[in-house]
Image (cartoon, helix red, strand yellow):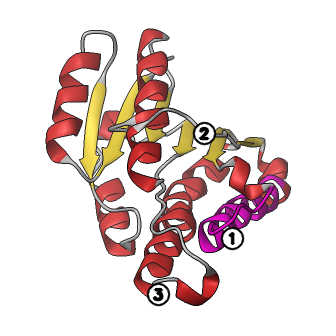
Amino acid sequence: MKQTAFITGATSGIGKATAEIFAKNNIKLILCGRRTERLKELQNELSTLTEVTTLQFDVSKRTEVEAAIRSLPKNFKKIDILINNAGNAHGLSTIQDGDVNDWDAMIDINVKGLLYVSKAIIPKMTERNKGFIVNIGSIAAKEVYTNGNVYCASKYAVDALNKGMRLDLNKHNIRVSAIHPGAVETEFSRYSF
């Protein structure tokens, strides 16, 4: 039986590359993002390889996350693989000069967004005693760089959550892993830094 993967931040960068590889391996895809046009383009492109549906929502908005996941068609409700990829970096400044709005955005997307999506999907995985979760972190979760204080803190939080999830979900036969990439040539890195 075909597996189904749920990918946040699927419209560009690592999320898009993951979707393309999964499609080539005949994994059904639930592609999530904020940009409707990009979701449609990617769905059209990958539908030639596998079944694809899309969800347009902002991971930092809990009610949007919950409503979107509830709206999934029946044949996409059994999620085998969760890729928590959505993330963002705002601002590059010292702590004393930081913009509180930038801080809120990073914590809301990078930390709370990962939690909201996970909370909406994990209970069904635990019911089935099966699943695989990959949390996309950053090398910034391992070493703080100049003017990256809050972004790095948000990625340290992803790393801690990943370890906590692994401890909590191991008894439910759910594998949990993290990938902490360094600089990757993506739209994210061009606009963030």
Q: Which residue is mark 1?
A: 153
> Which three-letter amino acid code belongs to the residue tagged 3?
Val
Which circle's residue, 1 or 3, is located before the other in the chain? 3
Q: Which residue is mark 3?
A: 100
Residue in the picture at 81% in, 57% down: 163
Residue 162 makes an appearance in the image: no
Does 172 sit above or below residue 18? below
Residue in the picture at 33% in, 73% down: 63
Classify residue 146 by image quadrant: bottom right
158 is within the stretch colored magenta: yes
Tell me where the magenta segment starts and ends, as one range: 143-166
Does 130 sit above or below residue 101? above
Q: Secondary structure at mark 1?
A: helix
Q: Which residue is mark 2?
A: 183
Does 85 sit above or below residue 148? above
In depth, the one of 37 and 29 nearer the eye is: 37
Which circle's residue, 3 or 2, is located before the other in the chain? 3
